[in-house]
Image (cartoon, grey):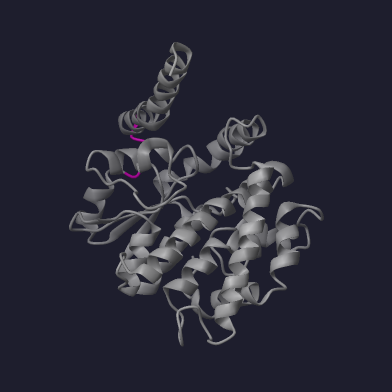
């Protein structure tokens, strides 16, 4: 490796160091000093005797964690943050105690210290991502070979499905941040104004400049192709049984449903409420991202399975 390659490598490492640790640490410090709301989630969980679920309200991984926690009958409160604004409190909650998200392939920046969801229990124990919450709910061994293979596939699909929501936001003008103030603790509702007038437009512009990759159209098409492949596999299983998990609804069904909700917009979802409202009103952009996915995947047996599962089993919807 020559000197130019060495220099480029050092520069890349420097950028990664800033993105992965210094930037979220700075956000966490600002969040703490300004006391922007919520307080320490560990202390809040201990004091109230109720678990705290840190989330982004329109994240489909948060939707999976929320659904799993509700299905378990867990007593908890959701503590919602909007994108970018979530970085400080999540890093602060995770980093000091070493609670990194080691599962999801979507986690690159911050080394897994700013991902959602993150579940904190009154005794100080945690469930560090949607998969650990799901596994605890259904008592699944994370090392089970069949489950591990499915989880790896679903995590990759879920990571690609991010592009559906963000493409809808950036290119079709669907404000997924418009989730309603009831999803936020009173001390955190200030985020809604910040999102509408500053953070949301900033994120959209950064996506258009390709500074942020979430609405990349090539990734969107990759996600569409993978969803087709996964639907083929799902329909093969459903040809011989009622649910992906066997004779009753389970973890395989819940994960498939939650992580494809952006593409199917089930009315009961808590993660795509802005797009669902537009769909109900007949106002989704005619040639937009969401309608394109809907027209294809709601016609498939796998898509109909998602809609059925949401209708029958998403009883704890916010």
Q: Is residue 45 above or below residue 258?
A: above
Q: Seen from this angle, which residue lies furthest top? A: 3
Q: Position of residue 71 (x, y in %)?
A: 39, 73
Where is residue 125? Give x, y as percent.
21, 56
Magenta-drawn segment: 34-38
In this orientation, which residue lies closer to the viewer: 68 or 293?
293
Q: Is residue 316 magenta?
A: no
Asked if residue 35 is among those painted magenta in the image, a careful observer would answer: yes
For the point 20% across and 55% down, the residue is 46
Residue drawn at the location 34% of the way across and 39% of the way down: 91
Q: Position of residue 62 (x, y in %)?
A: 45, 56
Residue at (34%, 63%) from the top-left corner?
133
User: Is residue 42 toward the left or the right of residue 19 in the image?
Assistant: left
Q: Is residue 316 visible?
A: no
Question: In the rendered image, is residue 171 in sight?
Answer: yes
Q: Residue furthest left?
A: 123
24 over 242 or under it: above or below: above
Magenta portion: prevailing SS class = loop
Out of 161 and 90, give the one closest to the viewer.
161
| The N terminus, quarter of image | top left
């Amino acid at each position: 490796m020559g000197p130019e390659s060495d220099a480029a490598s050092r520069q890349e490492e420097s950028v990664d160091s800033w993105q992965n640790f210094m930037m979220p640490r700075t956000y966490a410090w600002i969040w703490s000093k300004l006391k922007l709301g919520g307080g320490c989630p560990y202390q809040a969980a201990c004091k109230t005797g109720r678990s705290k679920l840190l989330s982004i309200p329109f994240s489909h991984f948060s939707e999976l964690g929320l659904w799993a926690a509700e299905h378990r009958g867990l007593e908890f409160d959701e503590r919602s943050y909007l994108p970018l604004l979530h970085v400080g409190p999540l890093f602060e909650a995770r980093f000091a105690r070493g609670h990194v998200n080691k599962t999801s392939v979507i986690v690159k920046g911050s080394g897994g210290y700013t991902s959602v969801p993150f579940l904190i229990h009154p005794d100080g124990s945690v469930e560090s991502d949607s998969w650990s919450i799901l596994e605890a709910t259904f008592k699944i061994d994370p090392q089970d070979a069949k489950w591990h293979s499915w989880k790896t596939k679903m995590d990759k699909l879920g990571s690609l499905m991010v592009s559906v929501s963000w493409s809808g936001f950036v290119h079709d003008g669907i404000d997924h941040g418009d989730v309603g103030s009831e999803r936020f603790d009173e001390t955190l509702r200030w985020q809604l104004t910040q999102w509408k007038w500053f953070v949301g437009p900033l994120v959209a512009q950064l996506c258009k400049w390709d500074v942020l990759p979430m609405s990349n159209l090539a990734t969107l098409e990759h996600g569409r192709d993978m969803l087709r492949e996964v639907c083929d596999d799902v329909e093969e299983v459903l040809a011989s049984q009622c649910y992906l998990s066997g004779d009753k609804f389970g973890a395989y069904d819940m994960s498939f449903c939650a992580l494809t909700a952006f593409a199917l917009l089930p009315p009961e979802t808590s993660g795509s409420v802005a797009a669902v409202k537009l769909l109900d009103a007949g106002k989704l952009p005619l040639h937009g991202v969401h309608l394109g996915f809907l027209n294809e995947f709601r016609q498939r047996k796998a898509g109909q399975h998602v809609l059925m599962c949401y209708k029958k089993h998403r009883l704890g919807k916010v």
